[in-house]
């Protein structure tokens, strides 16, 4: 039987018809970005744009191009009122906000430091809604997301998304570019022996994280009584995709070096969408002290500590935080 197309899946799963349009626009943007990434070496686009973004990071040429693709592809989506992009300081309003209009939060090209070394990168998105006519507030808790997902530009281009009930993965046909359902009902196993963290930051870690990693490294003879494996791709989309596929726990915690900024990863268009995906797949997504999706945002680009993945492992890490509180 031929795998469902993206449109067939969205229709069968009763997605709001205007949300179907927006998701299909996002899928079109993903196809275009996948093409830009694949041909970047020929077009001389793998390097830096010599611009600094609102995050204080040097923008890659493709960061800016991917943002422009998202804006151009989604700008005419019905009921889409505003865009919040990692690459743009201010909120981009497309129309006067009316109740139930869509708000699109996105990181157009996450992990772009991997571009010149030909490793997987991705785009992350989340959709929330305008509360009332004329309400221009975009700072809503992640719990209010009606849809979240990512595109991953790896050996294959995939689109993974949820509206909160299940997580579905679609693979782009390499010839036609059409996304077809290849990973229905993705779930995160509750247990894992695989963690992902940038261990070069160990000297900055606070006690709960340092203790957790030390216990994993101690292996069978340590407090966990079993060996652990480690992965770190420096591309959140790739790490989260691995966890949605085979389990694991991902940590980008607050530490003594980044805590003034609130952590490294951004709440509205990285942590919140990934948290919705992981929780919809049966996992957990925490700051260490509470659920990411319960964090009340104060600013569009605010950062937050991220600990997400197999729920039993996240619970161990939260317990270590409570022990040290
Ligand atoms: P580090 C990429 O820049 C990113 O935002 C995430 O995709 C990734 O998990 C993290 O930062 C990598 O950070 O400090 O290891 O380079």
Image (spheres, grey):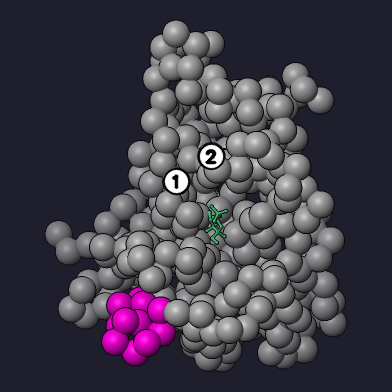
Residue 267 picture location, percent across and down: 69, 57
Relative height, residue 80 to residue 105 (above, below): below
Q: Which residue lies furthest to the left in this view?
A: 1
* Labelled disc at residue 199: 2
Residue 252 picture location, percent across and down: 61, 45
Q: Do the residues labelled 2 and 1 touch (CB within 8 Å)?
A: yes
Frontmost residue, 305 versus 55? 55
Residue for point 66% across, 77% down? 53
Left or right relative to 131: residue 23: left
The question of residue 35 being in magenta is answered with yes
The question of residue 227 being in magenta is answered with no
Q: How crowded is mark 2: few (under 14 residues within 10 Å), some or many (20 or more)?
A: few
Residue for point 48% across, 54% down? 234
Frontmost residue, 46 versus 83? 46
Residue 277 picture location, percent across and down: 52, 51
Locate residue 221: give its quadrant: top left
Q: Residue furthest top?
A: 221
Q: Give the range drawn in magenta.
A: 32-46
Q: Earlier in the sequence, mark 2 or mark 1?
A: 2
């Amino acid at each position: 039987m031929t795998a469902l197309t993206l449109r067939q899946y969205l229709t069968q799963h009763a997605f709001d018809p205007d949300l179907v349009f927006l998701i299909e626009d996002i899928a079109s943007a993903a196809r275009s970005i996948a093409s830009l990434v694949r041909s970047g070496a020929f077009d001389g686009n793998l390097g830096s744009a010599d611009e600094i973004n609102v995050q204080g990071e040097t923008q890659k040429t493709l960061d800016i191009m991917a943002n422009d693709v998202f804006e151009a592809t989604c700008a005419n989506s019905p009921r889409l009122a505003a865009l919040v992009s990692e690459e743009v300081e201010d909120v981009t309003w497309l129309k006067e906000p009316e109740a139930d209009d869509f708000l699109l939060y996105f990181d157009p090209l996450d992990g772009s430091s991997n571009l010149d070394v030909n490793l997987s990168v991705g785009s992350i998105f989340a959709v929330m809604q305008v509360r009332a006519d004329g309400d221009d507030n975009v700072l809503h808790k992640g719990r209010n997301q009606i849809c979240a997902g990512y595109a991953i530009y790896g050996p294959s281009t995939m689109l993974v998304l949820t509206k909160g009930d299940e997580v579905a993965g679609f693979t782009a046909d390499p010839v036609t570019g059409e996304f077809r359902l290849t990973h229905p009902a993705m779930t995160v196993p509750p247990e894992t022996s695989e963690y992902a963290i940038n261990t070069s930051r160990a000297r900055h870690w606070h006690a709960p994280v340092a203790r957790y990693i030390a216990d994993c490294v101690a292996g069978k003879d340590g407090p966990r009584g079993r060996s652990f494996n480690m992965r770190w791709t420096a591309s959140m989309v790739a790490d989260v995709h691995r966890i949605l596929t085979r389990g694991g726990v991902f940590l980008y915690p607050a530490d003594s070096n980044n805590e003034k900024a609130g952590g490294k990863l951004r709440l509205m268009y990285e942590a919140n969408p990934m948290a919705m995906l992981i929780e919809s797949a049966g996992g957990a997504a925490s700051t260490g002290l509470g659920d990411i999706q319960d964090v009340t945002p104060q600013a569009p680009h605010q950062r937050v500590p991220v600990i997400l993945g197999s729920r039993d492992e996240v619970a161990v890490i939260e317990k270590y935080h409570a022990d040290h509180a």
